[in-house]
Image (tube, rainbow, N blue to C red):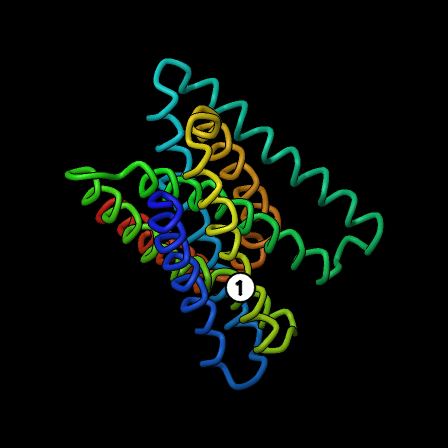
Amino acid sequence: MRSFLWAAGGTLFTFLMTALGAALVFLFRARIGARMNRLSLGFSGGVMSAASVFSLLLPAMAQAQDAAWRVATFGFLAGAGLMAALDACIARRLGTQSEDGRRMLLLFAVTLHNIPEGMAVGLALGAAGGASLAGACALTLGIAVQNVPEGAAISLPLRQSGMSRRRSFALGALSGAVEPLFGVPAALLAGCVRAAMPWLMAFSAGAMTWVVFSEMLPEAGRARDGVLAALFGYALMMALDIALG
């Protein structure tokens, strides 16, 4: 019961921080123009790129130890391959320029990325006791703070693609709902889950990177301001990961 309560409380907190980031979409009163679209896509792409490296790949390699290069390479390629297959399937069904298809890919990739983060929090808090509790709380706080720009990274591009503010917020917030859904069972089944974590993190990193490279950065890179926004988003997320990781 103790493991359940700690894991539930911690992952609920990280979910709420994702919702807080998604709520930034309410700062925009109406759909805005091409320049702001580039800025939001660039910022979001930068945030997601840094998260895939510093939140997922590097921790996966550290946990995998001697198998680090295999886990990072093959897990990453598997995640990217899945998104490539989904992208091709969506293009056949909805058309290559479908906004709905782009929304689905973006939402799926970031939601997938939140699964291992929630499991990491659940495992840390579920096993915490004594001195280790401080470390588990620090990990939870770090992921929670990182989730703020990640929530915005979903809701802002969705809003710019024409979706309503309320729906953009709801989908951005719900992407973080997988953290308690997967984090609590991970705490209760720690022995079975821990060994698979490096693979899950590398897989999620590959999925996110595919979406960034195929859907976000090409549009953001059409002008210098989009590139600068991507660099700022990357630097912000990198700083948060290093400072709070």
- Give above or below for 232 relative to 155: above
Residue 145: x and y in percent read 31, 58
Q: Is residue 67 left or right of residue 160?
A: left
Residue most extreme to the right: 93
Q: Residue at x 52, y 86 (%)?
A: 29
Identify residue for label 1. 172
Q: Is residue 229 visible?
A: yes
Q: Secondary structure at mark 1?
A: helix
Residue most extreme to the top: 66
Q: Is residue 194 left or right of residue 41?
A: left
Q: Of residues 180 and 117, which is closer to you in this image?
A: 180
- Give above or below for 78 relative to 106: above
Residue type beneath disc 1: Gly
Q: Is residue 183 left or right of residue 217?
A: left
Crowdedness of circle 1 by 10 Å Cα count: few (<14), some, many (20+)? many
Q: Residue at x 71, y 62 (%)?
A: 99
Residue most extreme to the front: 1
Quarter of the image where one finds residue 104: bottom right
Residue 229: x and y in percent read 41, 61
- Give above or below for 132 relative to 73: below
Quarter of the image where one finds residue 66: top left
Q: Residue at x 36, y 32 (%)?
A: 58
Q: Is residue 228 visible?
A: no
Q: How many marks?
A: 1
Quarter of the image where the C terminus is located: top left
Residue 41: x and y in percent read 52, 61
